[in-house]
Amino acid sequence: MICVKDFAEDRYLVMATKKGVIKKSSLADYANCTRDGGLIGINLAEDDKVIGTVLTTGDNELILVSHQGLAVRFRERDPETGDVLFRATGRATAGVTGMRFKLDSDYLDVIEVVDHNAKFLVASEAGLGVRTRFEDYRLVNRGASGVWAIDLPEDGSVQLAGALSVKDTDEVMLLTAKGQSIRTRVNEIREVNRGGKGVKLLTLAEGDKLLGIARIVETEEEIEANSVSDEPEAPPTASAAPTTPEA
């Protein structure tokens, strides 16, 4: 789900599929998508499916992460020449290759817009996470096979649980297969080098695994309630003791 105020001409939807295909189209092309049945956003291969969609300005950088821990970072436009490196096409068309996979069993899991004021958190099913700068993922051409975001076992016994852009002031929710949910502050997750095994995000019960991570977005009501609860309590006011008439 993408929330927008209006269908601006200078915004784009970028869809990504399990097979590493990406498709960019103008947000304005979806102005009539409220009609019954919706509108076609991408022509998919018979055995492919959309795994994520992001909103871009046409000048953003994007990062793709595969299920086995590889990542590709690339630009929509060359900032020096102004050349478009990833063009928008009509809605009912197929996409282009966003990422190639080194292993036949691999597939695309995550698409995110790069935010250089944030960090990139990548988590494995083993409950380990790598939080690092986006700049640690070198810029490459669209369609590359990428670099390691997190070190996962070669036998495929542990794979990607999720990845997302986070700021130090954010909190994230960690969800496990056995129904455990842990809320933690991002600034409590130590930064480590890209491609490492990561640091422990939570302690898993035997046979459990991390299924996904999500950034917590507080509503205005929650923010207001938290700010009130953080205020120190006012000291009790002294009241005059009642007087009793003398006998």
Image: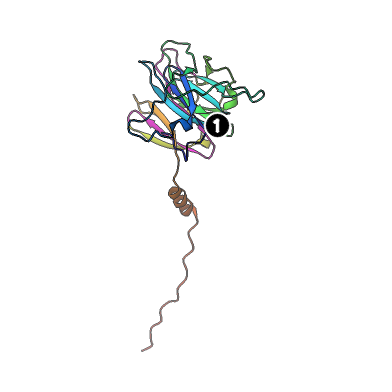
Question: Which region shows up in magenta?
Answer: 151-178
Q: Is residue 168 magenta?
A: yes
Residue 202 image-quadrant placement: top left
Q: Is residue 195 visible?
A: no
Q: Nearer the viewer, residue 28 or 62?
A: 28
Q: Is 149 rendered above or below residue 172?
A: above
**Residue linked to disc 1:** 57
Q: Residue furthest right?
A: 80
Residue 73, how many percent across, how many down? 55, 22
Q: Would residue 109 appear left or right of 166 to someone viewing this image?
A: left
Looking at the image, which residue is at 38% across and 88% down? 246
Q: Nearer the viewer, residue 76 or 183?
A: 76
Residue 115, how many percent across, how many down? 56, 32
Residue 85, how many percent across, how many down? 58, 20
Q: Residue furthest bottom?
A: 247
Q: Helix, strand or loop at disc 1?
A: loop
Dot 1: within a 10 Å radius of its alpha carbon, few (fewer than 14), some, or many (20 or more) residues?
some
Q: Is residue 36 visible?
A: yes
Q: Is residue 246 magenta?
A: no
Q: Which quadrant of the rendered structure holds the N terminus?
A: top left
Q: Nearer the viewer, residue 175 or 38?
A: 38
Q: Which quadrant of the rendered structure holds the C terminus?
A: bottom left
Please, what is the three-letter code of the amino acid marked with disc 1?
Thr
